[in-house]
Amino acid sequence: MAWDVVVVGGGPAGLFAAVAAAERGARALVLEHMSNPGRKLLASGGGQCNLTHGGEIMDFLPHYGGGTRPGEAGRFLRPALYAFSNSDLVTWCTRRGVSLTEDPDGRVFPISRRAQDVLDLLLAEARQRRVELRTGVRVRSLRVERSRFVVLTAAEQKSVVEGLTLVLATGGRSYPSLGATGDGYRLAASLGHAVVSPRPALAPVVVKRNAFSPFVPCAGVSLPGAAVAVVRAGRPIAEESGDVLFTHRGLSGPAILNLSRHVFPGDVVLASLLPGSGDIRSTEGRLAAEVAAHGKRTVANLLQGLGLAACLSRALLAAVGLGPGTKAAELPREARHALAVSLASGANGGHPFPVGSLGGWNEAMVTAGGVPLGEVDPKTMASRILPGLFFAGEVLDVDGDTGGYNLQAAFSTGRLAGTSAAEKARSEARRRVTR
């Protein structure tokens, strides 16, 4: 006997899809290859589970990347987000005993700050809805026979599962240490879908070693509200503002993580070292005035007087070829201009950090790339290629900013996929009866 809905993947998108399907009377089965479901959910938000963001749901749309055109990911997610919004998620959790709280930055967490509470809620709801969860089951292959999905699990288990519909909610490739395999891309391709090459997103930037060596001692220093841009072949690709954190290999922090979906090796990241300093011209004028007024001071002291951290003052001087004892009166005009560029927040301002690479899969919080959005119906999460196939979560070519946007997309697409799959299964069952 075939299940109404088979869900591959026991993360938040998969569990929510199964619960949504069961709410509509479908017999739902979840196959999870790890021994315990939701391991990545448990690690989210540093174990505190930043499961969504505050504000109006319409404001979520610009916070997603993916697709082939600017804004395509937000437009794609709109039906799912509006059908099950951030306020709907808060209400859903609160009514079931998990109260949430919003921090000053708009991030929403369980009051307990325990991701385990959210996972326990999902599993309890699945049990209540009689969703069957099978763990330690890795899907080896998929095929379609007689309008049914045949799921073959790992060879040693020699198990076959059939479903009237199938939801792929396998997640991406980030955090393989938590069980991510990227199997969903292989399975989607086997059913006729293309796959946009997966790459790390919400990942730190590794700066080329020679260019970053003066800044290595600044690991742990942060720049609040910095202006950051990605430049490729002299052309600006993307811009962001937010906190920037120096690491021992490069740059991280919310602004860098959100930009990382646009970053490739060979690009240059421009980061203002003095946030709020104004454009290059005004910053250079301010420097010139300080030099004229305090010519006997060292340039390092002068920069610190402007608000630059001592560590960054020393690093910036080294980067432009000046010694730490250089007097302000001895500052060449060319060096003064270079300093102003690195400090400035306006157009074309910011210190240039040439990109060597992005942080790898064990550092990336999410995956960019996946099943192309044009191959999925945004109103149902159904495949446009194979009837009865649905997608949810990170397996899609969608990645959100840091701050709860990715988990909200997982819940919203999971719920829409599960609801749609249940309706499709009911329709298929009626069709079989009347034949």
Image: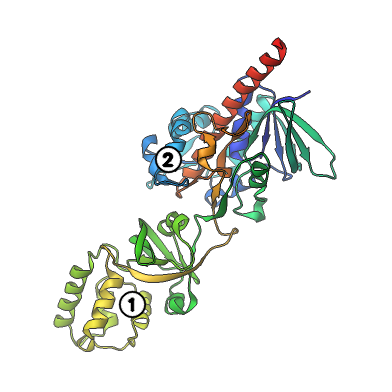
Q: Which mark is residue 313?
A: 1
Residue 102 in view in this figure:
no
Is 49 on the left-hand or right-hand side of 388? Answer: left
Q: Residues within 10 Å of mark 1 (few under 14, many from 20)?
A: many
* Residue 156 placement: quadrant: top right
Give the distance between the C-alpha atoms of the residues marked 1 and 2, in whole angstroms: 40 Å
* Residue 25 placement: quadrant: top right
Q: Which is in the foreground here, disc 1 or disc 2?
A: 2
Residue at horizontal 39 percent and vertical 35 percent from the top:
57
User: What SS does tag 2 mark?
Assistant: helix
Is 399 on the left-hand or right-hand side of 157? Answer: left
Q: Are marks 1 and 2 in contact (CB under 8 Å)?
A: no
Query: Going from the N terminus, do you reach mark 1 or mark 2 first?
Result: 2
Residue at horizontal 47 percent and vertical 45 percent from the top:
67
Is 254 on the left-hand or right-hand side of 9? Answer: left
The percent coordinates of residue 30 (x first, y second) are 69, 34
Task: Check disc 2 and report the residue beneath it.
Answer: 74
User: What SS does tag 1 mark?
Assistant: helix
65 or 124: nearer the viewer: 65
The percent coordinates of residue 124 (x first, y second) are 65, 31
Q: Which mark is residue 148?
A: none
The percent coordinates of residue 187 (x first, y second) are 68, 43
